[in-house]
Image (spheres, grey):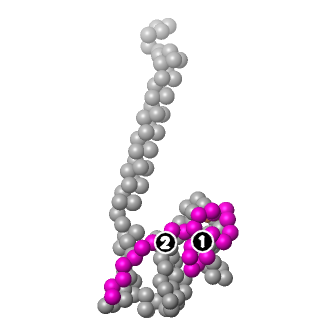
Amino acid sequence: MDRNKYINRKAFLRIITFGTATAFVALWANMIGKHKHLSAKPVVTKLNTAKLGNGIFFFERFILVKSDASVKVLSNRCTHAGCRINQEIAGQLVCPCHGSRYESATGKVVQGPAGIALSKIPYATDAKTGEITITI
Ligand code: FES
């Protein structure tokens, strides 16, 4: 048998390790690239809040809480593990993943496991039309 035709065990493991590491780095770089692409492109939403009425409105990237006295825009990402908050129960914003609850008027935590309030998202108001612009 010609032993030169075969690679030894050590060389085989080196090739497998190098191949796996290369594939992992390529996959990771691809994921990072996609994430940067998404976060680099802000989405602008314009809303005429007068037409909405009062209440809690869930949008793809934020939650709008409107009353006669104020308009608040809150992040819809739960501060526990990032699930999208998409429901309101008895005036509280409720995360569907692990049940964290937030005060809808302020975004403060009412019940964990989340420990940090929802972030407030700034917006601009057009004084003439009353339309608000949210960039997120
Ligand atoms: S992600 Fe919302 S409670 Fe865990």
- Dot 2 falls on a residue whose secondary structure is loop
Spot the residue most to the left.
128
Decide which of tag 1 and tag 2 comes sooner along the chain.
1
Does residue 89 appear in this view?
A: yes
Q: Which residue is mark 1?
A: 108
**Counting other residues with Cα less than 10 Å from the Cα at mark 1, is it few (<14), some (14-19), or many (20 or more)?**
some
Query: Viewer-proximal residue, 131 or 96?
Result: 131
Does residue 84 appear in this view?
A: no
- Name the spot of residue 61 as percent of width and height, x first: 46, 70
Residue 120's label in the rendered image is 2
Amino acid type, residue under disc 1 in the picture: Lys
Q: CA distance from mark 1 to mark 2?
A: 10 Å
Magenta stretch, main secondary structure class: loop
- Going 67% across and 65% down the picture, which residue do you hit? 112
- Dot 1 falls on a residue whose secondary structure is loop
Q: Which quarter holds ligand 1?
A: bottom right
- Going 53% across and 66% down the picture, which residue do you hit? 77
Residue 23's label in the rendered image is none
- Going 65% across and 67% down the picture, which residue do you hit? 100
- Name the spot of residue 19 as percent of width and height, x first: 45, 31
Position of the C terminus by quadrant: bottom left
Amino acid type, residue under disc 2 in the picture: Lys
Q: Quadrant of residue 55?
A: bottom right
- In the image, residue 123 lies in the stretch drawn in magenta: yes
Q: Quadrant of residue 135?
A: bottom left
- Going 46% across and 8% down the picture, which residue do you hit? 2
Residue range in magenta is: 103-127
